């Protein structure tokens, strides 16, 4: 049985190797009725095979995570534009030297927001330290969108502690590469936002949303909506940076206007410290910790 499986896998690999060699030799890929269907890009990219692509984007990350024992994640969202303090201060210094007023203003905002990068990294360390003490099936793994900024910071914090860390990247017009702190075997790239967001929720035991833009808001409100409508189990939904979130969105207005119920405001909470965020998760699940605190 094992020998047959090896033969099958070798044939699959050979089909793709042949296709790659064709491309490497500078030959354009033309439609070919005789090419194996699973190794035919023109066929797989047809409108009619979109359902197959959905299924593949569902299966590939699911199978890979299951194989590595990734069953429980803490998802961290936030701006891709934030930078760590050293990089932000270097950008400000360069902008001031060039005398570019617009670049100076942008660099000053990077310095002002660099603490979010630091706090996301610190939070992820707490999660990784806790998990290092747990049996595999009880471990929590940091999962992000895999890109730069807050996502990089969270992956970096887990990486600091030697933990596996997940990145669910997305193909964008301005190509976004995975940050270097995502575990290579858990670095996934999606075409469909819907499938990517589904994977965020499939294993999520908590969500920590740092300040961010449209993408962060999209992901945050999708999670809140799923929990509100009981399409997903309740999980801690933590908004890091109360001043930012309260200035950005007046959620009390939704209650005043009757568009949500007062109890819906209990679906999330504001936090301003990595330890407080971690303590909220510990309390929600009744976790037993051994004084896992910030370093």
Image (cartoon, rainbow, N blue to C red):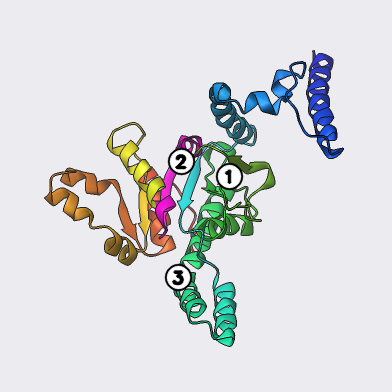
Position of 68 with respect to 272 (left or right) is right
Question: Residue 107: x, y in percent?
Answer: 51, 76
Q: How crowded is mark 2: few (under 14 residues within 10 Å), some or many (20 or more)?
A: many
Question: Is residue 195 on the magenta stretch?
Answer: yes
Q: In which quarter of the image is residue 35?
A: top right
Q: On the image, numbered disc 2 is attached to which residue? A: 204
Q: Is residue 170 left or right of residue 181?
A: left
- Quick one: label 1 or label 3, which is nearer the N terminus? 3
Start and end of the magenta stretch? 193-216
Nearest to N terminus: mark 2 or mark 3: 3
Whether pointer 2 and pointer 1 mark residues with C-beta atoms closer than 8 Å, the reply is no
For the N terminus, which image quadrant? Answer: top right
Q: Residue at x 82, y 14 (%)?
A: 4
Q: For this rendering, which residue is in front, 29 or 286?
A: 29
Q: Where is residue 212 in the image (x, y as percent from the top left)?
A: 42, 58
Q: Distance between the residues labelled 2 and 1?
A: 22 Å
Q: Please tell me whether mark 2 sits on a helix, a strand or a loop.
A: strand
**Quarter of the figure with residue 225:** top left
Nearer to us: label 2 or label 1: 1
On screen, residue 292 versus residue 41, left or right, reads: left
Q: Residue beneath label 3, please?
A: 113
Q: What element carries label 1?
A: loop
Image side of residue 221 versus residue 43, left or right: left
- Which label was assigned to residue 171? 1
- Whole-angstrom CA distance, mark 1 to mark 3, is 26 Å
Say what secondary structure mark 3 lies in: helix
Residue 19 to residue 207: above or below: above
User: Contact (CB < 8 A) between labels 1 and 3?
Assistant: no
The residue positioned 33% from the left and 43% from the top of the image is 224
Mark before the other along the chain sequence, 2 or 1: 1
Is residue 282 something that shows in the picture?
A: no
């Amino acid at each position: 049985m094992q020998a047959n499986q090896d033969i099958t896998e070798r044939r699959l690999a050979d089909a793709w190797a042949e296709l790659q060699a064709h491309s490497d030799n500078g030959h354009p890929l033309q439609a070919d009725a005789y090419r194996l269907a699973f190794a035919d890009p023109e066929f797989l990219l047809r409108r009619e095979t979109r359902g197959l692509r959905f299924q593949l984007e569902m299966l590939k990350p699911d199978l890979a995570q299951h194989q590595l024992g990734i069953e429980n994640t803490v998802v961290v969202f936030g701006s891709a534009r934030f930078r760590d303090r050293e990089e932000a201060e270097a950008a400000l210094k360069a902008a001031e030297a060039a005398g570019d007023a617009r670049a100076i203003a942008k660099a000053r905002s990077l310095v002002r927001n660099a603490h979010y990068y630091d706090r996301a990294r610190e939070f992820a360390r707490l999660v990784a330290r806790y998990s290092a003490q747990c049996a595999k099936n009880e471990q929590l793994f940091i999962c992000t969108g895999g890109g730069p900024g807050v996502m990089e910071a969270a992956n970096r914090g887990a990486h600091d502690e030697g933990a596996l860390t997940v990145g669910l990247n997305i193909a964008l017009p301005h190509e976004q590469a995975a940050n270097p702190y995502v575990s290579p075997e858990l670095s996934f790239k999606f075409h469909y936002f819907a499938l990517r967001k589904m994977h965020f929720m499939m294993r999520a035991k908590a969500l920590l949303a740092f300040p961010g833009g449209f993408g962060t808001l999209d992901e945050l409100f999708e999670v809140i909506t799923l929990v509100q409508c009981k399409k997903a189990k309740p999980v801690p939904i933590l908004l890091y940076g109360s001043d930012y979130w309260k200035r950005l969105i007046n959620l009390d207005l939704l209650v005043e206007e009757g568009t949500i119920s007062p109890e819906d405001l209990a679906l999330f909470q504001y936090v301003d410290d990595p330890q407080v965020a971690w303590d909220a998760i510990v309390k929600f699940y009744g976790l037993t910790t051994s004084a896992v605190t910030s370093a």
